[in-house]
Amino acid sequence: MPQSGQQRVYDVGIYCTLSTVCTPEWRIRVDSATVGAPGFETRNTVEECLDYCNRDLKCFGIDVDILVSPKQCWKHDDPSRFREDNIYPQPGTNSYQLITRCPMTTETTGL
């Protein structure tokens, strides 16, 4: 039984982070693309492309065609794609290599 002033903690298989702020860290190569993206998704903004990658544990980076709308987000699922010999000049495309991923958080209510 919790003592006065303590909270009860229930392990229901969902882990929550209530007050953390995290900003993913990216290595950005302007006017560059990376060889080997299997395909692309579309998002409205560059930030949405980056969030799309951060949320996918298999994503190690993303190339974003910034000249089109919606943006084309070319996801990379192999970290070796970001070797210097796999990167080439591509005007209007920026390559973002994910250096530090933010952990995903889940909020629960009604417990």
Image (cartoon, helix red, strand yellow):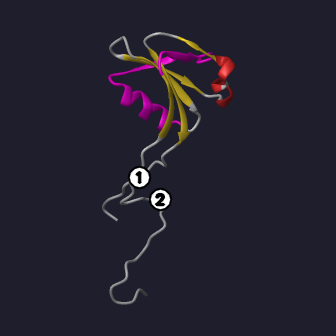
Q: Given the image, on which type of amino acid does mark 1 rest?
A: Thr
109 w.r.t. 88: above or below: below
Q: Is residue 47 magenta?
A: yes
42 w.r.t. 105: above or below: above
Q: Given the image, on which type of amino acid does mark 2 rest?
A: Tyr
Q: Residue at x 48, y 37 (%)?
A: 54
Q: Which residue is mark 1?
A: 106
Which quadrant does the N terminus fall into? Answer: bottom left
10 w.r.t. 78: above or below: below
Closer to us: 85 or 59: 85
Q: Residue at x 66, y 18 (%)?
A: 86
Which quadrant does the C terminus fall into? Answer: bottom left
Q: Which residues are magenta?
A: 30-56
Closer to us: 99 or 53: 99
Q: Which residue is mark 2?
A: 15
Q: CA distance from mark 1 to mark 2?
A: 7 Å
Q: Looking at the image, which residue sits at the far bottom? A: 3
Question: Decide: marks 1, 2 in contact (CB < 8 A)?
Answer: yes
